[in-house]
Image: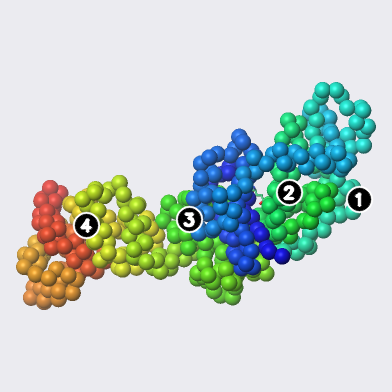
Amino acid sequence: MTIRTRFAPSPTGLLHIGNARAALFNYLFSRHHGGEFFLRIEDTDKERSTQEAVDVIFRGLKWMGLDYDNKGEVRFQASYQPRHAEIAKQLLAEGKAYRCYATQEELEQMREEARAAGKPPRYNGLWRDRNPSEAPEGQPFTVRLKAPKEGKQVLNDLIQGTVEVANAEMDDLILLRSDGTPTYLLAVVVDDHDMEITHVMRGDDHLTNTFRQMLIYQAMGWDCPKFAHLPLIHGPDGGKLSKRHGAQSVIEFREQGILPEALCNYLLRLGWGHGDEEILTRQEQIKLFDLDGVGKSPSRMDYAKLNHLNGVWLRKATDERLIKEILSRLKDEISEEALPVFQKRLEILMPSLKERAANLVELADNARFALPGPIPAFNDKALKILSNEGIAVAQKTANMLEKLEDFSAEPIHTALKEFAETENLKLGKVAQPLRASVTGTTASPGIDVTLAALGKEEVIRRIRATKNLIKSEGAA
Ligand code: GLU
């Protein structure tokens, strides 16, 4: 049997990490078993579904590198409503479902009674065995499943183990609403059946739905797919993951400079383990992933760990890719003429820049000084260094550097060392004011690489400009 999994998000929010992890697990499970992974957009809640959320699902999956196999044929659930309704009508015709004419008041009364008896609110079967001839004419009705009252549902969940629910605990669920639209419970079953899904892997908040959906499979005489319910992701404090904890949607993580490999690696390790292996490439993930490694208890989101993994993946990324990231993140600050110069500078700086940044936002911030032109701002520490004797040292160093013919990192390094010796200064005392002058900060890649990347002309211009800067700050 070819394994076929699916990811079935509702486009009502912006791809939450719980969903992203479900997508990843479904993807890895199918790939591990040489199976298929399908995408279905559950857009039946027209009021809450948005095009933006649909776009985010597509972009998010692409960004995470989760290829689905039904490209060009992604199933949009709402378009299949006639098919869902057809199944409800079939069940009705077979006497496995019935029309329910209960009024709002009657339903409210049932809820009241259940509440009073300390039971969960539920439908009491008012129309289950009534003769259809009693149906009030022209009145709206819902279609309900005639669910068994005896016996139990036994679910052999691939993660949770065996879970049972007595049929008496469940009421006759609605298949078609009074406006004729199919319910979510029905739509999912029909779609999973029609798409020939073999394994349904989703958050364990769907566990109650599963028992009710099993009743629909049985009524139709369809084989149930295998189910695997993933424990949820909680906030770091064990409560529900919410905004105050930090980013939650895949897009937010991306904006915060997280690499997709880092997010996937993190989400995989959250609730799945294979020994102590922490850093896993996609190939390794596919090779190792299976459901026996998935834990049963909820996991806690650990932002510090994600950031740590992000640093690891950032250092593994190619310079070329990181340069592209910086160019896209700083695109509004880069003029057309500046672009080739900036790009060349980044090529020189990238091996050092990527050692220092924890994420892509930081990487872009740290690279900003290399934009051609004057430095937009000096930070306080840089100003402090330049306001002491630093400024004089920088000017003097500029005179020396101006004469240097080969302005690449190595000769710069030698020249600065010799200069420091002659001036009887520690190398740091020479490097610091230089760095402050040419970057406006006190942290950058090694001074030799920094100067070489900027090029002689820009270095000298920037150092000379600091004379005026300090005067205008009133510090010289
Ligand atoms: N559309 C559901 C959700 O986004 C998932 C349904 C399922 O996986 O069966 O929560």
Front-most of residues 39 and 201: 39
Residue highlighted by disc 3:
63
Q: Nearer the viewer, mark 3 or mark 1?
A: 3
* Residue 125 seen anywhere in this rendered image of the structure: no
In the rendering, at what x and y percent does residue 442 appear?
24, 61
Name the residue tied to disc 2.
Answer: 189
| Front-lying residue, 394 or 42 | 42
Q: Quadrant of the C terminus?
A: bottom left
Q: Which mark is residue 197?
A: none
Left/right of residue 29 with respect to residue 89 in the rendered view: left
Residue 41 appears anywhere in the view: yes
The amino acid marked with disc number 4 is Val
Count residues near mark 1 (Cα–Cα under 10 Å), then give few for <14, some for 14-19, many for 20+. Answer: few
Residue tagged 1: 150
Distance Cα–Cα, label 1 vs label 2? 22 Å
Residue at (9%, 70%) from the top-left corner? 405
Left or right, 324 with respect to 336, comes to right
Give the structural element (helix, strand or loop) at label 3.
helix
Give neighbour class at mark 4: few <14, some 14-19, many 20+ (Cα, 10 Å): some
Residue 341's label in the rendered image is 4
The structure residue drawn at horizontal position 53% and vertical position 70%, both measured from the top left corner, is 283
First in sequence: mark 2 or mark 3?
Answer: 3
Q: CA distance from mark 3 to mark 1?
A: 48 Å
The image position of residue 233, as x and y in percent, is 60, 56
Ligand 1 under 8 Å from disc 4 Cβ? no
Return the x and y of residue 179 as percentages of the image width and height: 73, 30
Nearer the observer, 471 or 166: 166
**Residue positioned 48% across, 55% down in the render:** 63
